[in-house]
Amino acid sequence: MTFRMRSIRPILAWLVLLLAVTFSAAVAADETCNSPYMTGLIKGQEDFVHVWTLGVEGWGDGSDKLVTVDANPRSKKYGKVVSTVSVGGHGEAHHMGFTDDRRFLWAGRLDDGKIFVFDVGTDPSKPKLVKTISDLHDRSGLVGPHTFYAMPGRMLIGTLSNTGDNGGVTGLAVYNNKGEFVQKYMLPTGLLNGVQGDGYGYDVAIDPAKNVLLTSSFTGRDNYLRDLGSLIKDEAAMKHFGNTMVLWDLKAMQPRRIFSVPGAPLEIRWSLNPKDNWAITATALTSKLWLIRPDASAVWRGTEVATIGDPAKVPLPVDISIRADGKGLWVNTFMDGMTRYFDLSNPEAPKQTYAKQTGRQVNMISQSWDGKRVYITSSLLEHWDKAGADNEQFLRAFNWDGKELKPAFEVDFAKEKLGRAHHMKFSARATGVAQADDTAVSTPGY
């Protein structure tokens, strides 16, 4: 069934306003990097970490899969894999996102564009594949589903490329929670507020209280499926990376400002402190932190505020994770395997206060809402991961006491032949209360 946007805009606008009022109260626990529209957030200790994993030929069935690891220290299976769900095939498994009711987890592949929907609400220890969506390319002309961002009854998907030329010009796709295509919105390529749009996409982040949607930019399919070594040596190809962020009017779904942010700005994190009015991102190629906030005249602007490592060595900042109170930020850099912590007490002048090498290559980082646990995975992209001994594939868990990251457990995805570990999401048992045993719970908790 195809919906006309004029029929859903009034409903969407009403929901945006309603949720803007309840936003501060709704966010009460869980990971710090989820959509504000999600309900049923975890109240305390997460029980499981779900890892979306790219298959490797010769490792097990060689298929992309969702791997579930027990993360409750009270469990007999703590730090162990408790289930895997293979989806068949191999297509650059990358990111995931919960639906607004948190019962289902959507996971995408950057190569063939397939989207897999897992039921994680019935029994989070044993997710089940319930739907495969294969029409993104045909319905939207967009390629590379990257960010899955819950909206009321909808899934907003940020993409990386297009079917026309496999380049970086792309857009946003909207599906309903049943997996039916609704609409697409192209990222701007024209001139807006004096800045030229490049049309590139990557992450999506919303602050409903401010009626603001932010998007960032990366590169197209021709680049992200290439070998990293040859790509870096190709001067022409290196010019085809995003250098902008876009601020949208959320209710109207219209671009309002374009910010020049050189060097491929990737993950976007809004401060979750209700007193704050800013978001932060990291640029992969220029190794900078950028702050997006309104100035004294209420005009939104992007400002470079800090340097990550030594940009001359291209450490390649990848994922970031903001603290629940907005006072600190974890940053992973892929090339040097470093995990850094920045004090954001003054977001206009972040200060690095801690650094630790957590792997030979590191990518995603997720912290618990209370900030006491940090999880790290290793894989970036199949053709960008390192070779030989540096090609570590893992999920590593750490405890954080405010001074030091202390290892808690590790799952070696290479040794267990699971694949390349990429994105993570947390879940809890049905009661939302950590349990000391491994008894399966079949009653939905979300």
Image: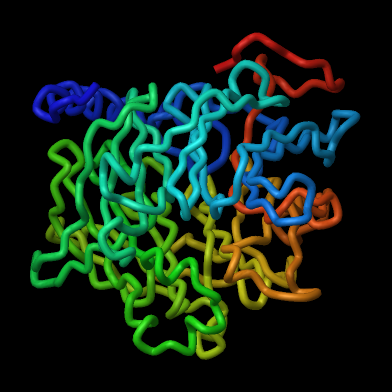
Q: Against 306, is 204 above or below?
A: above
Q: Residue 70, can we see it? A: yes
Q: Position of residue 79 (x, y in %)?
A: 83, 41
Q: Which residue is rendered at x = 29% and y = 32% of the image? A: 181
- Residue pictured at 40% horizontal, 39% vertical: 149
Q: Is residue 34 above or below residue 348?
A: above
Residue 220, x across and y down, in percent: 36, 65
The answer to which image quadrant residue 441 occupies is: top right
Nearer to us in this view, 350 or 361: 361
Residue 347 appears in the picture as rendered? no
Residue 120 x, y percent position in the rendering: 60, 25
Q: Nearer the viewer, residue 340 or 274?
A: 340
What colouring method underlies this structural image? Answer: rainbow
At x 65% / y 48%, what residue is drawn?
53
Quadrant that contains the N terminus = top left
Nearer to us in this view, 298 or 444: 444
Left or right of 155: which side holds 189? left
- Residue at coordinates 75% horizontally, 74% vertically from top-left? 390
> How many numbered discs sit on the rendered protein?
0
Q: Residue 309: x percent and y percent? A: 56, 80
Q: Which residue ends up furthest to the right in the rendered image?
A: 76
Q: Is residue 27 left or right of residue 69?
A: left
For residue 132, side relative to residue 241 (left or right): right
